[in-house]
Amino acid sequence: MLGRGCLLRDARETDLEAVMRIEKASFPRYPYPMSVFTILLKQYPRYFLVAECSGSVSGYVCGSIAGENLGRVVSIAVEPRLRRKGVGRMLMLGLESRFRADGVKAIRLEVGVDNESAIRLYESLGYRPMGLRRRYYPNGCDALVMVKRLERDVADNTT
C-alpha cells in the first residue's frame, strides 16, 4: 500500500472502464477515446499503471517509448475527489521507476499551459520546460513541453 490507502499496480483490461470514467471527468472537452487506452495497454503494458484506492481504480498513468532512450507520459489523471492528495505523484514516480529500470534516459510530457497544478507537480518532480506547442489541444490551448533527465540509480529496486 502506498499513500492514503492506495496501491500502485499494473493496469488490466478490466480497468479500462474506470480509466475512461476518470479520463472523461478530467478532460470533459477532449477525452481520449477508449481505443487509445486499449492500444496503449496492448503495446506498453509495463508503462500503464493504476492507483487503486479503497478498492477502486482512482487514477492512472500511461506512458510509451519514443525512440531508444526517451519515455513519454501519454496521459495521467486522478479522480477529482483525490486530487492534491499525492496520488498523481505516486503514479508519476511509479512510471519513472519503470522507465529508469528499462534504461530510459529522459522523459517527455505535454501539459496545458493553463494547468498550473499539474505544472507545479511536474516541476516538483524535476521536469523542466523545454518548449511550447502552439494550439496542441483540440480546444486551441497551447501545451508546455517538459522534460526530465533520468539517472540510473543502482539502488532503485521499485519496479
Image: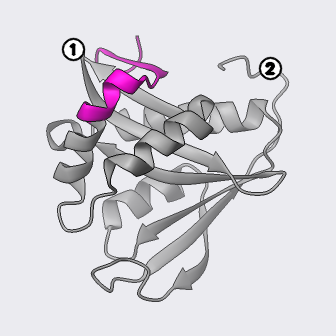
Tell me the tag on residue 116: none
Magenta residues (range): 1-18
Residue underneath mark 2? 155
* Number of numbered labels in the structure image: 2
- In the depicted view, which residue is nearer to us: 108 or 48? 48
At x 78%, y 44%, the residue is 104
Looking at the image, is mark 2 or mark 1 nearer the viewer? 1
Q: Is residue 132 above or below residue 98?
A: below
At x 61%, y 29%, the residue is 46
Q: Earlier in the sequence, mark 2 or mark 1?
A: 1
In the rendered structure, which amino acid carries the disc numbered 1? Ser
Residue 114 in percent (x, y) is at 31, 75
Mark 1: few/some/many CA within 10 Å (<14, 14-19, 20+): few
Q: Is residue 29 above or below residue 15?
A: below
Mark 2: few/some/many CA within 10 Å (<14, 14-19, 20+): few
- In the depicted view, which residue is nearer to us: 137 or 39? 39
Q: Along the horizontal axis of the image, is 124 left or right of 17? A: right
Residue 49 in percent (x, y) is at 47, 30
Query: Residue 15, can we see it?
Result: yes
Q: Along the horizontal axis of the image, is 117 left or right of 136? A: left
At x 33%, y 47%, the residue is 34
Q: Along the horizontal axis of the image, is 134 left or right of 85? A: right
Tell me the tag on residue 54: 1
Quarter assignment of residue 14: top left
Q: Are marks 2 and 1 in contact (CB under 8 Å)?
A: no
Whether the magenta-drawn stretch holds residue 145 is answered as no
In the rendered structure, which amino acid carries the disc numbered 2? Ala
Whether the magenta-drawn stretch holds residue 7 is answered as yes
